[in-house]
Image (tube, coloured by chain):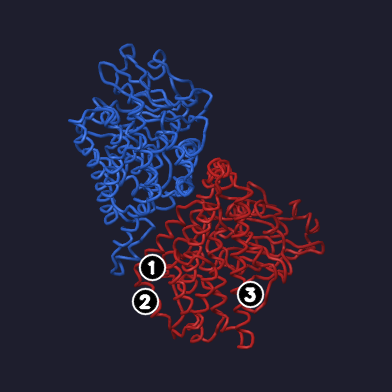
Chain colours: A red, B blue
């Protein structure tokens, strides 16, 4: 049995039903007869234990943090309180964009354990993108998700004292923020011990590490990451944090939740779409390739359009926070559309910067993407990765100049034709 | 007697010696014979009780927060925890720039009470600037203070987990931040109840309130104020928060301490110097006027030069935080001077924006400056204030274009010649 006094102990498939068997919110779903429960450990992420627990009555997901980075082992300790931040971020996301995340049934802070809805037949979006599958409504769902969470978690909307109190709480997620600060914003740009990259990429890594102007820009983005507490972000919104069916999309795994720049989530999401785009020649033949790549670019365009449309709608209907108050604009007969344009420009600039940096770290730092990793032919992989690295560089350098999502996609088409290797 | 269990109660000159008479760190300075103590309440600020307590053995300052805004009365409640933030900010300032603030002898959180060094014969700097007096070393002391506190409280220097924990603590100062958010960034730009301004300024107020581009810029600065937790700031660094002799300068009253943009304190300080500058024709005759005004502009130039020089020195010798790490620059044979230039540009831009906004709020919002208020001739005052308002507008609009402190002072000279009224 789990209770608030219990010392943390990782679950196993053998102990799970005994330890969770008398929690009402779980037995409500699985029934009280724990002998009929069956558990399977399915965690394939980098950090946690994940169990599917089934019974004749239903199924739930049990996610438990481990006190170290699963990908690396117990040589890299990691605090259990990330479950606290995942739980609280899920609750806020559910409130700000209802239906966007799995339903939560139970949370145990001491055990770093969350019991939630088993999403079925959902599949990790990254796998679908590698397989060349499409999801209807994907762009709109995630564009809305990014807009609603960004807007409703900011001083555009919240009572500022509450926003500040929540900002204070999330400063406690400093060890997961430190992972992002290190693996994303720093490691790719020097010889960090944990780095690895595909054979053949050395000349491109050399270009990046010798581009001082770009490295300065990366660190200016790090300053924003670590200090610009504009809103509560998911913090790790890549295609492995999204589960889909053909026509439903859910966002999972926000343990990296933090207060940061409003463009962070949407920028990281688009970045992972670009990596799906550039990696496609490693996954399918010429007959399907162009069509699917264009579908991905359409997905990027539509996602960002949905983001801007929803952000605009919220700006016009829910702008009740301290920022850009009606007293200074509408109440004096002045439109605040100018300000909205400025805000959207600021968000796009940050999003493009993050996008470029994420395109680097996923090929050079510790945690790589299956999009590229599953391409067995190293020469092909390196050729595609080189495009991705060089486009990332241009995005970081030009983040203030690229002022619409169409220009971003045009740039991707250009890099997709380059033969660097 | 005061102890941690005591319910808050404001001190009076009658109760002070009884209540503080057995606190060792105070009797160390005043002696144990409380009959020989004499107290005088001298608070002339907007918020607090301030006593000078003297004995034959010595003297101390006792500062106690009131549960409301003293300037307004008990209709505007204000939390006592601002004493906590003042105390903690003083301690951090003392560590980051030793000797810059009064020595602290005693702090009582429950009584919202700080006992500190009695600065004598120090005078509030604003009074000296109105009287046409000079302070040697002023520019260097405050330039260094702003640079050292900005740098050493940021992720350029601190262990980021400690910086995040401290950021979390300071989110609790939300009610004093709300005063700044309201009185500085919002009220001047609409008909707020608490506003008042000098007769004759209506046309200029009209210009400001109808300049939508400028109002957007003000709110973009508010976004930075409320969300860019770059470093721990004093939060209220005007010439009334500075005490000087002819050759010594101390900073007091940091109860508005908050994590915000690195340019905030130095921008507010310069703003108050500009107000001293523009108000001078109301205080002295032609024989002294030009000379003293140029002394103030020299003070501004020298303060900012000292700020940049000290920030640069710290950048080169103490850059041990996560931002712009040596691993990405010097260790690869690359200079980080480019990055320093970018950072100083970013700080100057924010400082100029804050400077312009402060120049507005001190004439239009609740709390005005004696620099202008003590000019009895309303026509003269309005003429000088108009210059100040219009220059403030240009600073807000041009904050990204003015790239050195000399250009800023040249602009002040230009506005000082304008005859708007």
Task: Say which label, 3 or 1, has the lower sequence index.
Answer: 3
Measuring 50% from the left and 83% from the top, which residue is drawn there?
A417
| SS assignment at label 2 | helix
- B332 w.r.t. B360: above or below: below
Q: Position of residue B123 (x, y in %)?
A: 27, 27
Front in this rendered view, residue B229 or B218: B218
Residue at x 71%, y 54% (from the top left corner): A105
Q: On residue A214, which mark appears?
A: 1
Q: Are marks 2 and 1 in contact (CB under 8 Å)?
A: no
Mark 3 against mark 1, which lies toward the viewer?
A: 1
The residue pinned by badge 2 equals A206
Do the residues marked 3 and 1 share a common chain? yes
Q: Is residue A253 above or below residue B115?
A: below
- Left or right position of A50 against B227: right
Residue nearest the observer in this picture, A45 or B52: B52
- Toward the left, the furthest residue is B287
- The mark found on residue A127 in the picture is 3
């Amino acid at each position: 049995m789990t209770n608030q006094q219990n010392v943390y102990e990782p679950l196993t498939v053998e102990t799970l039903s005994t330890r969770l068997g008398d929690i009402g919110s779980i037995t409500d779903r699985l029934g009280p007869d724990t002998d009929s429960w069956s558990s399977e450990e399915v965690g394939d992420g980098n950090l946690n234990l994940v169990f599917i627990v089934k019974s004749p009555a239903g199924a739930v997901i049990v996610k438990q943090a481990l006190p170290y980075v699963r990908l690396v082992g117990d040589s890299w300790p990691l605090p259990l309180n990330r479950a606290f931040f995942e739980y609280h971020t899920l609750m806020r996301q559910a409130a700000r964009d209802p239906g966007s995340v799995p339903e939560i049934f139970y949370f145990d802070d001491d055990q770093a354990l969350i019991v939630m809805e088993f999403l079925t037949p959902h599949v990790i979006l990254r796998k679908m993108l590698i397989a060349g599958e499409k999801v209807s409504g994907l762009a709109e769902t995630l564009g809305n998700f990014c807009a609603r969470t960004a807007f409703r978690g900011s001083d555009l909307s919240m009572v500022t004292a509450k926003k500040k109190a929540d900002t204070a709480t999330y400063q406690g997620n400093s060890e997961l923020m430190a992972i992002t600060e290190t693996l994303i914003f720093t490691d790719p740009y020097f010889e960090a011990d944990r780095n690895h990259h595909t054979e053949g990429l050395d000349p491109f890594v050399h270009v990046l590490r010798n581009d001082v102007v770009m490295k300065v820009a990366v660190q200016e983005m790090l300053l924003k990451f670590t200090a610009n507490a504009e809103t509560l972000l998911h913090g790790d919104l890549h295609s492995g944090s999204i589960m889909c069916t053909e026509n439903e999309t859910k966002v999972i795994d926000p343990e990296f939740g933090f207060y940061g720049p409003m463009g962070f989530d949407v920028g990281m999401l688009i970045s992972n779409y670009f990596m799906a785009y550039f990696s496609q020649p490693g996954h399918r033949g010429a007959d399907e390739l162009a069509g699917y790549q264009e579908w991905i670019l359409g997905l990027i365009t539509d996602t960002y359009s949905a983001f801007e449309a929803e952000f605009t709608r919220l700006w016009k209907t829910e702008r009740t926070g301290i920022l850009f108050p009606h007293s200074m604009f509408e109440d004096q007969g002045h439109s605040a559309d100018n300000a909205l344009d400025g805000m959207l420009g600021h968000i796009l600039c940050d999003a493009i910067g993050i996008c470029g940096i994420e395109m680097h770290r996923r090929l050079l730092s510790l945690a790589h993407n299956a999009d590229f990793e599953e391409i067995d032919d190293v020469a092909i992989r390196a050729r595609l990765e080189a495009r991705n690295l060089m486009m990332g560089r241009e995005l970081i350098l030009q983040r203030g100049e690229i002022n619409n999502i169409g220009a971003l996609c045009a740039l991707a088409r250009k890099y997709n034709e380059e033969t660097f290797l």
